[in-house]
Image (cartoon, coloured by chain):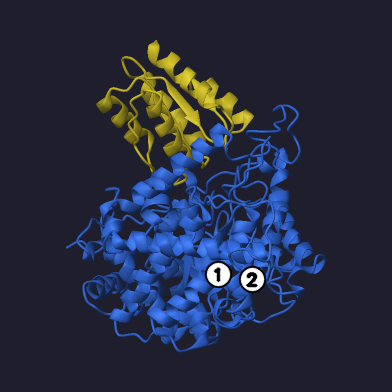
Chain colours: A blue, B yellow
């Protein structure tokens, strides 16, 4: 078995690095310019100065209905997680209600089924939304709308709610949960949410750039970072074109990165991304507030890096990735659990993931020293090389035209398809070593450890469709209809949609109804799959 | 309703590189859409990739539809989530081959070629 001599993005790894390596200038002459202390511009060494501060430890959860997922939250919080993060099932992630014909067999099996405010109320029942970080990997517009309403219902100021929502206007259609809505509408929705949060929920990260999900298409670290920045830059420019001040929203931009098994390069990637972001926001976009320049970085460890063969090995992968991320100084972390090749996390796997983080933090004391790789001839050289390649790729992509045109013109679609084929090819050929999969296999009948937990299945919640029908019938129909008409109207205007969306959510309008009406206002069918008719027809 | 496409895209390309004509129908298919595409395109084999558990419910439906056709098209299913138990169940309803994680390209090509040649 040969070991690769390159990082995933192709950078050569020498056998050892010496003081006269490429980064000597950085280290000797330009410490303040290129590195800075943790918590100082350009933030290469850390977003904050927070020795021993650890990171927000959480496991991505969500399964079945809101009640079951609420129980998951409570269990994980009891076990010491310091924040929550929730993901919807496939229909929810695609903005589809559970009564849609396509949703039938997948309700609640890959995440939680959420479609109306009652669901969110149940999801966050007895969860202190003003005390812990509430992150959502679910639909951002509805997470924000419901959190806002919940805060008001509980007599909490929405301005005290902390957490984040993902935004992915560029890439969702091609490698993730397709919204099947026009790009312009998705981008507008993204910007409206960010603007709303900056005004009404200033402690909440309305823009968590999600490079995790699209890099799971087999992208390497450089491609991941470059595409993340292309998207961030376009959203920033769009917001600035609205007349917003950069410092009014940039402090609440954060990035959710991936973490593969390419240990050193993942650390270098994070360091490079912090430096690139800081310089870009200050020098190119004119920010004055240091908080605009210091980007918060969260991480979800790579599901693609896991194997279904020998599931216990995935525990090791999660631990190795956690060490890398602790060394890189991230602010929040979720481990992809050992059974995720088969299913969304079991209770057992959730606990192992959380304990992994706690052990690395409390026993190995990883964050007591911040950026321990700082000053390393190797790591500074690698950080510089990753940065150079990322900047070159951003320039290359942006030179091909308006990023919006690249989205709609198919450039990114092709990019992802190419990356997917490349990854498949690399694993099939053995160029990428996957222990248990293409090397060091164990016969199927001997590979039994943790299989019982990993392979356990549960039924989709078929009854949700009927329950939704009952709920819909119980609503004040004219109030719902009026609120949907208002959403239609505001979507056709230049106004921020959030106020109308929140009002609609409050009347009991569902996610599918609200988004469907927004699609109609944009000149596309209410239901892109052609099964449903609009409630405001005529 | 599954969007995990890496394997589907990778295998489609792999099969094309090995001389097969592949029509990739993308994500979010149902038995109806698959059947329609298969008949319209006059395919020799249907290949299904799934990372969700929907195949447990959709495959019996699809196999039933296919068995009503004059010459039922053989079906192969792939996906890392497929357990040994699932494989057996799929075999029982007439799925011609099931490819779990780690199946070699050569095996996939060989199986599909044999089915197409029938």
Q: Chain of mark 2?
A: A
Residue furthest to the top: B118
- Where is residue A392 shown, x and y percent of the image? 41, 62
Which quadrant holds residue A504? bottom left
Residue furthest to the left: A538
Q: Chain of mark 1?
A: A
**Residue at image x 56%, y 54%?**
A64
Q: Is residue A476 visible?
A: no
The correct choice, above or below, for A535 with respect to A242 in the image is: above
**Residue at image x 21%, y 72%?**
A492
State the residue in front, A477 or A501: A501
Query: CA–CA distance between discs 1 and 2?
Result: 7 Å
* Residue with the mark numbered 1: A135
- Where is residue A327 shown, x and y percent of the image? 69, 66
Q: Is residue A419 visible?
A: yes
State the residue in front, A519 or A470: A519
**Residue at image x 38%, y 22%?**
B45
Does label 1 or label 2 sit earlier along the sequence? 2
* Residue with the mark numbered 2: A83
Where does the C terminus of chain A fall, quadrant-wise? Answer: bottom left
Which quadrant holds residue A372? bottom right
- Where is residue A242 shown, x and y percent of the image? 29, 81
Which quadrant holds residue B25? top left
- Where is residue A324 shown, x and y percent of the image? 67, 60
Where does the N terminus of chain A fall, quadrant-wise? Answer: top right
> Marks 2 and 1: in contact by CB < 8 Å?
yes
Say whether residue B74 is left or right of residue A348.
left
**Residue at image x 45%, y 43%?**
A420
The correct choice, above or below, for B82 with respect to A35 in the image is: above
The correct choice, above or below, for A61 with respect to A216 in the image is: below
SS label for mark 2: strand
């Amino acid at each position: 078995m040969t070991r690769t001599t390159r990082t995933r993005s192709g950078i050569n790894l020498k056998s050892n690095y010496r003081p006269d390596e490429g980064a000597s200038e950085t280290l000797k002459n330009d410490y303040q310019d290129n590195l800075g202390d943790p918590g100082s511009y350009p933030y290469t060494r850390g977003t904050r100065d927070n020795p021993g501060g650890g990171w927000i430890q959480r496991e991505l959860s969500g399964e079945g209905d809101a009640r079951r997922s609420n129980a998951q939250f409570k269990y994980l919080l009891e076990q010491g997680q310091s924040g929550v993060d929730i993901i919807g099932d496939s229909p929810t992630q695609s903005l589809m209600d559970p009564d849609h014909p396509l949703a039938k067999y997948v309700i609640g099996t890959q995440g939680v089924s959420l479609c109306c405010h009652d669901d969110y109320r149940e999801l966050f029942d007895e969860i202190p939304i003003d005390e812990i970080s509430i992150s959502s990997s679910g639909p951002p517009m509805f997470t924000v709308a419901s959190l806002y309403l919940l805060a008001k219902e509980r007599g909490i100021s929405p301005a005290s709610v902390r957490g984040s929502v993902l935004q992915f206007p560029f890439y969702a259609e091609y490698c993730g949960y397709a919204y099947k809505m026009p790009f312009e509408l998705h981008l507008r929705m993204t910007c409206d949410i960010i603007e709303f949060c900056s005004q009404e929920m200033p402690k909440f990260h309305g823009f968590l750039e999600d490079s995790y999900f699209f890099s799971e298409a087999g992208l390497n670290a450089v491609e991941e970072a470059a595409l993340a920045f292309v998207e961030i830059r376009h959203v920033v420019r769009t917001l600035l074109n609205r007349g917003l001040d950069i410092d009014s929203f940039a402090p609440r931009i954060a990035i959710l990165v991936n973490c593969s098994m390419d240990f050193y390069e993942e650390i270098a990637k994070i360091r490079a991304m912090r430096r690139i972001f800081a310089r870009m926001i200050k020098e190119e976009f004119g920010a004055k507030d240091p908080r605009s320049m210091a980007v918060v970085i969260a991480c979800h460890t790579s599901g693609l890096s896991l194997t279904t063969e020998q599931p216990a090995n995935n525990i090791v992968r999660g631990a190795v990735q956690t060490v890398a991320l602790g060394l890189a100084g991230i602010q929040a972390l979720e481990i992809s659990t050992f059974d995720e090749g088969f299913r969304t996390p079991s209770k057992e796997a959730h606990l192992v993931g959380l304990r992994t983080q706690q052990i690395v933090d409390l026993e190995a004391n990883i964050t007591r020293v911040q950026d321990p790789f700082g000053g390393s001839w190797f790591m500074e050289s690698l950080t510089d090389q990753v940065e150079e390649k990322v900047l070159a790729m951003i320039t290359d992509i942006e030179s091909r035209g308006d990023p919006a045109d690249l989205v709609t013109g198919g450039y990114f679609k092709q990019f992802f398809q190419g990356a997917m084929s490349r990854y498949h090819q690399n694993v099939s050929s053995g160029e990428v070593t996957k222990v248990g999969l293409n090397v060091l296999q164990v016969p199927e009948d001997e590979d039994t450890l943790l299989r019982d937990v990993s392979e356990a299945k549960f039924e989709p919640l078929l009854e949700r469709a009927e329950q939704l029908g009952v709920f819909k019938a119980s609503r004040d129909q004219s109030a719902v209809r009026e609120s949907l008409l208002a959403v239609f109207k505001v979507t056709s205007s230049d106004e921020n949609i959030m106020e109308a969306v929140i009002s609609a959510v409050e009347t009991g309008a569902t996610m599918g109804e609200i988004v469907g009406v927004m699609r109609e206002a944009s000149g596309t069918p209410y239901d892109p799959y052609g099964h449903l008719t609009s409630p405001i027809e005529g | 309703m599954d969007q995990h496409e890496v394997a589907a895209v990778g295998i489609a390309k792999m099969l094309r590189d090995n001389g097969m004509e592949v029509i990739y129908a993308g994500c979010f298919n149902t038995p109806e859409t698959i059947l329609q595409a298969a008949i319209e395109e006059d395919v020799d084999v249907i290949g299904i990739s799934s990372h969700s558990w929907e195949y447990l419910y959709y495959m019996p439906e699809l196999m039933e539809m296919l068995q009503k056709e004059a010459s039922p098209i053989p079906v192969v299913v792939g996906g890392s989530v497929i357990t040994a138990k699932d494989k057996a169940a799929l075999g029982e309803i007439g799925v011609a081959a099931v490819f779990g994680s780690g199946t070699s390209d050569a095996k996939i090509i060989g199986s599909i070629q044999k089915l197409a040649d029938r």
